[in-house]
Every structure is written in C-alpha cells, then in structure tokens.
Image (cartoon, helix red, strand yellow):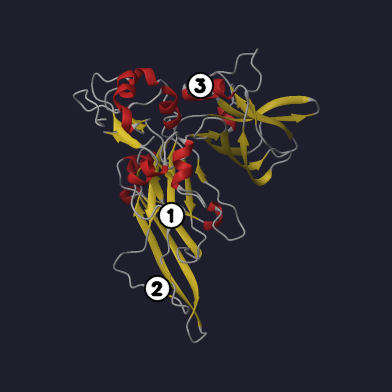
Amino acid sequence: PCLLLLAAIIRDAECTCADYSAWMRTDKVVPPCSMCGYAKGFATLKVAADASSLYVYLQLEGNVSDWTIVSAGIFGPAKNNQNKPSAKGTLLDLPYPANLNGFWQSEIRLTSNSLAETLTYMREGLTYISFITSKGGILREEIRGQIGASSCFESSLFRNSSSPPIVDGDGLERSPYSFGNILLSVEATDLAVLIQAPADLSRSPGNVVAVALDFGPAGALNIVPTDLGLLASQSPRYKVVHSADAGLVAALVAGQARVLVDYSLSLTSAAGVAYSVAGRLAAPATPGVACRELVVQDSTYYDMGRERLSDWITVWSLNEGNPDAEAPLQPRYFAHPYQIAAGETATSVLKRFGMTMTALQRLNPTVADLASLAPGQVICIVPVWSRTLSASGLPICQS
C-alpha cells in the first residue's frame, strides 16, 4: 500500500503501516446480521520478518446487548461475499472479550503449523476475521471484516523549523515529535488513524490537547486525544472511521491531507518556577515509503538485518546517522525499494542480486504472486553483494 500511481491505489511493498487490516461490522456478515447489537471492530496484522508468526492487534467498541462473545478467529478461504468452506475450521484463533460494553483492545503473537497456508490465503485476499456470539444455545456471527492489504499514509510530525528552541531548567532541549499513520481500506471507504508519541523526555510532546486531520477544501476530522490512546495511562489505539466521507478520502488520495497535533509541555525553569509551552506538530499525510519500518524501543540495525537474512552494515548503508543511536518511532529502511522494469521477472531479479526466493518472500510478505511481478511494481530487495551482477550481467565484485 506504499505507492500511489495516478488515482489508483496499488498494493506494493511493506512500509510503516501494518501489513494487513480489517474493518469489522454487522453489515459485513454474510448474510448481514440485521438483529445483531451495535458493535464495530478493527484489526491490524503484521507478518514477522522471518514469517514464523503473525502479530495481531484487535479493538472493538459498542455493545452486543445480552449476547455473549464465545469465539473469534481468522477464517477462509473466502471472498468478502462468501463464507468459508464448511469443511474448514478456524485458521487461527483470536482473543475476545466475553462481554462487550464500551471499548476493548488486545494484542497477540500467533504461531501455527498451518501459518504458511493462512498467509497464502491472506496474500490472495481470501481471509476474514469474525466474532461469534451466543444466547440461549443459539450461535450467530456478530461482526466480520475481510482482511486486506490497505493503503498506507504516513506523517513525521515536527515543530515548525522556524520556531525558537525549547530548553528546560536542566538545560535539556526539547524537540517534540510524533509519528502518524492513516490506513485506507482496500475498498477506499474506511479509515483508521494512529498517532504515536515517543516516551523519551527530549522528544515527548507532553500533554496532547488536540488532534486533527485537515483535508483542505474537503473539510477536517477532529479527534479527541483519548480516542487515540494518547493519555499517559492509556495504550495507543486507532481512531476508526467506518464509511468515511468520500470527499475526505479523495482529498487524502490526492495528497491534500495534513496531520495536526497540538501539545502542551509542562516545564520548570532553572529558578524552580513552573510554566508551560504550547505548540503544534504538523506534516502532510503522504503515501507510505516502501521498505521502511519504524524503529521500536531497543531495536538495532543488527536486529533489522538478522531478521531479514541481511546484516547491520547493509541496513545502516540505507539510512543516515549513528547506527548505535537510533531514536524510537523514526522510519528507517530495511531494504532497497526496487521498481520492476518491463521484461523483468522474480527469477531475473534473484539472479541479478544474488538472492534466494526465501529471502525475497521474507522481504515482501504481502505480495500475492512473486512469480508474476508487473512492470512498475515496487518490491523490497537486499542484494548479496558477492553475487550481484551489473546491468550488463558482469559480477560487480571481482575476485
């Protein structure tokens, strides 16, 4: 979801958003559940770099009346207007709240002997998430959402570069920062917004007082910070917009959206006097850049390289700065974005860059068919330099 060509949204290489997502509602049940309670859900799914596990984030909101949730899972193979084959059970079980009356969220890392089969179905758009409820011995499918490789938009949010520096009483310069992602569903009808703020004192935005998406002439979406889990006592969560206004979606795709975060820092002067500094972080929402991920706490270039059958020097060469001092929530390349040229195939790419199909699959977990790459498609590659060939077919490393 990291590339926009003309007005069409093309699914390509991995970027800072999760690999897959699903918007769940009662009207997506097949057939639609007209008697179900008021409940909606959202999920993101990210394939581990070695494809050995799947990281799933789930959130639900609303209520299911006096029905009890008894199971949840990933099902398939089925398109969004189909149910799974009767002979197929649950592909992967998911956590669920027994009762839903308000907001619920959960994260889980899933492993399974059948994970490879499930990931194949996911790449082909043939899986869905479903929550099952029960009352008086009667079972019903409450909400459902098709899993898809949604489009990703990102924003690195900084203060205006012309703003005066903020220095606290201890002489520490404060540089408030946040990172934003907007996910757009495969159908281009639903949105999900995530704002993440670093915890380290020098870059924390302190108290976030307002968040807005400015879509220019199309309007704006104002978000209460608690709906993003931005209070100190909260865990990050998505602001989910089901059936978003078509004008806002069009403005997002056209590059007219901006993310705005208003903050207030509580500081103490050298003389011990408390005061606050208010400001705004802002940036355009741009298509996610291929082959990048966000640095997480305590992660290193060594980890990024090892997970993808590469090495830390190769990863460092793709990025800027000190390899031993990476700040959390900064986007960093883990591989080279490579655009497929006319006549190129996965076989020719592997031969030129000395890679194995296993390595290519690890770097591109959501590409449905690596054997049928289209001209203009972007994939992630990490060349094995000792086996890489030039455009003329000669080794670039001479022994």
| Left or right: 248 as drawn, with respect to 55 | left
Residue 296 x %, y %: 50, 49
Residue type at mark 3: give it.
Thr
Disc 1, SS:
loop
Determine the image quadrant of residue 16: top left
Residue 190 x %, y %: 46, 37
Disc 3, SS:
helix
Q: Nearer the viewer, mark 2 or mark 1?
A: 1
Q: Dot 2: within a 10 Å radius of its alpha carbon, few (fewer than 14), some, or many (20 or more) residues?
A: some
Q: Which residue is mark 1?
A: 324
Determine the image quadrant of residue 389: top left
- Whether pointer 3 and pointer 2 mark residues with C-beta atoms closer than 8 Å, the reply is no
Residue type at mark 2: give it.
Ile
- Whether pointer 1 and pointer 3 mark residues with C-beta atoms closer than 8 Å, the reply is no
Work out whether 138 lies above or below 171.
Answer: above
Q: Dot 3: within a 10 Å radius of its alpha carbon, few (fewer than 14), some, or many (20 or more) residues?
A: some
The disc placed on residue 120 is 3
Q: Identify the residue at horizontal 45%, vertical 57% (top origin).
A: 211
Viewer-side residue, 222 vs 381: 381
Separation of marks 2 and 1 at Cα, in angstroms: 26 Å
Farthest-out residue, right: 136
Q: Which residue is mark 2?
A: 166
Q: Identify the residue at horizontal 31%, vertical 24% (top origin).
A: 349
Residue 129 x %, y %: 59, 29
N-term mark: 1 or 3: 3
Image quadrant occupied by the N terminus: top left
Work out whether 174 lies above or below 269.
Answer: above
| Left or right: 273 as drawn, with respect to 390 | right
